Amino acid sequence: MRKLWLVFSQTATVCLAVLFVVSTLKPEWLASLGGATPSAPAQVSILSTPTIPASANPRAASFSDAVQKAAPSVVNIFTSKEARARHPLAQDPLFRRFFGDQFGDDAQRSSSLGSGVIVSPEGFILTNHHVVEGADEIEIALADGKKLLAKVVGNDPDTDLAVLRVTTDSLPAITFGQSEAMRVGDVVLAIGNPFGVGQTVTSGIVSALGRSQLGINTFENFIQTDAAINPGNSGGALIDAQGNLVGINSAIYSRSGGSMGIGFAIPVSTAKMVLEQIIKTGGVTRGWIGVEVQEITGALAESLKLPDSKGAIIAGVLRGGPADKAGVKPGDVLLAIEGKPVLDPQSMLNLVAGLAPGESAKLSLRRGQEPIELAVAVGKRPKPQPQQ
């Protein structure tokens, strides 16, 4: 019996060993013995976006086409200005004998940078007046890296715009859009050269329209945007989602010097008017009647017994000016110019500026409680004095 048990144990051990080897090396033999088909190896399905040709419809979330359309028209502007400081001992003969004339002239060059927009294939470039103000030398860098010297054709400090020109042809001019069609919430892109790092694109929306009374320019009608505008962006392009120019980036509200999400751009409608006048005449001509006006507050309207706060109070009249000769007096309330209502001092300024110098304009006023009308011979608005 013991011998029989030993044979059984050895046989069982051998069978188990053979079964282990077969299951490890040839598992399909066991599956065929059981009548089952071998299972296929597991596969992982990976979902991927199909490749879309570049010529197909653009992605909805991308503004690459708009940027590619407008970016070649935006240039970097580098300016330099030489300031010479006279040494206090420059006139001393002894010092001049040893050091010569150069001792008395301490020449220093200051440089700044900004941006500009090519608005004509003939080489006209639109930028901010403050970017090129007082510059001795102006150099622009195209998007392809080519550098050219530029000259100022004319400027308009009242709107902070200037027109430059380079002596070359076939430049990539930008397409003008319609700033009047812009709505709050529309997507806009700002293109410029912030901090001199190179051409940069930022995106945002139109935050507000018709911003005025900010104390930035004489004539203000800004597009406000939250697209980041930083130092060096001044004079660059504000474009719509189709790549059309809708504004010239001009200023920011900031406590730190960097963007805080409140930037201002000059509407392209204003820029186009200034551009055309400068190219045609070398400057911008505006009407002027020689008055200072004041806003009508609710308290002021009540004290003067005015029916509402519309219009502008004549706070001062320049002696010998057009308004003085026409009989306008301080305290008069200006209600309309050539039939167009005066809503506030800013609208009055814009209406007067739109008058043609040398022509006669009808002013509708209220003197006391009596309405009166006066005809004024419109003068030419004097240029603002440069800041020292």
Image (cartoon, rainbow, N blue to C red):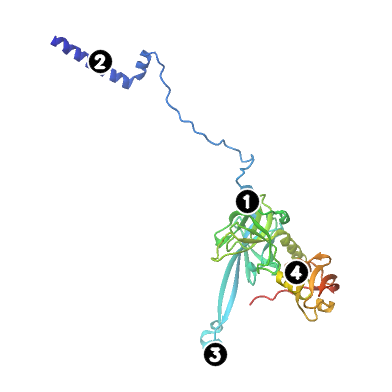
> Where does label 1 land, which residue?
67
- Can residue 217 be seen here? yes
Query: Is label 4 or label 1 in front?
Result: 4
* Residue at screen point 83% across, 71% down: 363
Sequence order check: which comes first, mark 4 or mark 1?
1
Sequence order check: which comes first, mark 4 or mark 3?
3
**Which amino acid, mark 1?**
Val
**Which amino acid, mark 2?**
Cys
Count of numbered circles in the view:
4
Most foreground residue, 188 or 324: 324
Q: In the displayed structure, would residue 208 be above or below residue 42?
A: below
Indicate the position of residue 66 as horizontal and vertical percent values. Answer: 64, 49
**Which amino acid, mark 4?**
Leu
Sequence order check: which comes first, mark 2 or mark 3?
2
Sequence order check: which comes first, mark 4 or mark 2?
2
- The reply to whether callout 4 and callout 1 are in contact (CB within 8 Å) is no
Element type where label 2 sits in the image:
helix
Task: Measure the C-alpha gap from mark 4 to mark 1.
Answer: 36 Å
- Furthest residue to the left? 2
> Where does label 2 land, which residue?
15
> Where does label 4 land, which residue?
349
Indicate the position of residue 127 as horizontal and vertical percent values. Answer: 66, 63
Residue 92: assigned label: 3
Q: In the displayed structure, would residue 79 be above or below residue 10?
A: below
Res 331 quadrant in image: bottom right
In this rendering, position of residue 98 left or right of residue 283:
left
Res 317 quadrant in image: bottom right
Task: Measure the C-alpha gap from mark 2 to mark 1.
Answer: 77 Å
- Label 1 Cα crowd, 10 Å radius (few <14 / some 14-19 / many 20+): many
Task: Measure the C-alpha gap from mark 3 to mark 1.
Answer: 60 Å
Task: Measure the C-alpha gap from mark 2 to mark 3.
Answer: 120 Å
